[in-house]
Image (tube, grey):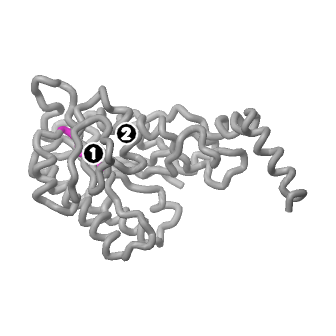
């Protein structure tokens, strides 16, 4: 499977300023869907590195770092306010609850992304980072994958005519290094993205120069098969995963907890 090909802008093309100047020189980052699984990981990791504005339809009862706002990404006026003086919009907000009607998924996943891009454009943000999914490759005919591809196509069209940079990150299955799914022979090892590598690819995308104007990049940790190549992300934004999934799997296998897990598995026929 080939890596998505990044589109790199002509270095001579006029771009928005690389940074916004102010008393605090750290980049101001808006994270939508900040209370979700991916959002919580990034917000925790970026608490000192960036000035964070965290938006979610359902903010946590005990907000973490950053300035938290309750907002619906489909609300253009709310998004316009949130995007003021923002350097980069990290758009994570999705509707992923399977029982929800398709109309709700589409309004959040597609229209919400369009609204986020429009609000960022109107506020002259430097970049939008859109969370996409490897479902586009793995389950291409599902509604979720089709919606993600539609968002990528819209982002590509906008980037062709507008100065704002847009990156679409096709994320694999996100999990911590110690997750039980990381086990030798697992069917999904090749498309796992550890929390550490999740932080690495998003940080690389935020920090990439404006010459990396548009791109669709795979986000996975190291695996010998590299079923989902990261060559494009490596060249364009400097993403280099640090976690080797197969090494982690064998580490789990030989760990004390792994030994106990194998013993329990061996005894299962007796208990049954």
Percent position of residue 147, x then y? 36, 67
Q: Where does the magenta region start and end?
A: 87-91
Q: Quadrant of residue 257?
A: top right
Towards the viewer: 230 or 86: 86
Percent position of residue 112, x then y? 25, 62
Q: Which residue is depicted at the point 13% across and 32% down?
A: 20
In the visual, does 204 lie left or right of 224?
left
Towards the viewer: 153 or 85: 85
Percent position of residue 255, x then y? 73, 33
Tag 1 residue: 31
In the visual, does 263 lie left or right of 52?
right
Mark 2 and mark 1 residues within 8 Å of each other at the beta carbon: yes
Question: Element under label 1?
Answer: strand
Does any portion of residue 10 appear in the rendered image? Answer: no
Tag 2 residue: 42
Question: Element under label 2?
Answer: helix
Cα distance in 3D space between marks 2 and 1: 9 Å
What numbered label is drawn on residue 165? none
Q: Is residue 88 magenta?
A: yes
Towards the viewer: 269 or 117: 269
For label 2, the crowd category at 10 Å Cα-Cα, with few meaning under 14, some 14 to 19 and many 20 or more, is many
Does any portion of residue 95 appear in the rendered image? Answer: yes
Q: Quadrant of residue 251?
A: top right
Q: Is residue 271 above or below residue 257?
A: below
Q: Is residue 73 above or below residue 255?
A: below
* Image quadrant occupied by the C terminus: bottom right
* Sequence-first tag of 2 and 1: 1
Q: Quadrant of residue 154?
A: bottom left
Q: Is residue 90 above or below residue 271?
A: above
Q: Which residue is depicted at the point 26% across and 59% down?
A: 113
């Amino acid at each position: 499977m080939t890596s998505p090909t990044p589109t790199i802008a002509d270095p001579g093309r006029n771009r928005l300023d690389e940074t916004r100047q102010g008393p605090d020189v750290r980049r101001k980052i808006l994270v939508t869907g900040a209370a979700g699984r991916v959002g919580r990981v990034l917000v925790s990791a970026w608490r000192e590195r960036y000035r964070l504005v965290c938006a979610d339809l359902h903010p946590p009862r005990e907000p973490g770092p950053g300035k938290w706002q309750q907002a619906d990404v489909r609300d253009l006026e709310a998004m316009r306010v949130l995007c003021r003086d923002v350097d980069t919009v990290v758009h994570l907000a999705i509707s992923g609850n399977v029982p929800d009607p398709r109309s709700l998924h589409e309004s959040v996943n597609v229209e919400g992304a369009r609204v986020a891009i429009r609000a960022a454009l109107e506020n002259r943000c430097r970049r939008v980072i859109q969370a996409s999914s490897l479902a586009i490759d793995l389950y291409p005919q599902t509604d979720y994958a089709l919606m993600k591809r539609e968002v990528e196509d819209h982002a590509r069209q906008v980037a062709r005519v507008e100065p704002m940079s847009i990156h679409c990150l096709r994320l694999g299955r996100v999990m911590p290094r110690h997750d039980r799914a990381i086990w030798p022979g697992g069917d999904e090892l090749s498309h796992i993205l550890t929390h550490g590598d999740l932080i690495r690819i998003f940080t690389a995308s935020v920090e990439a120069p404006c010459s990396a104007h548009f791109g669709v990049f795979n986000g996975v940790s190291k695996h010998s098969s590299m079923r989902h190549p990261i060559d494009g992300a490596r060249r364009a934004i400097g993403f280099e995963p640090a976690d080797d999934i197969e090494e982690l799997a064998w580490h789990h296998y030989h760990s004390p907890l792994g030994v106990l897990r194998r013993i329990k598995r061996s005894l299962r026929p007796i208990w049954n």
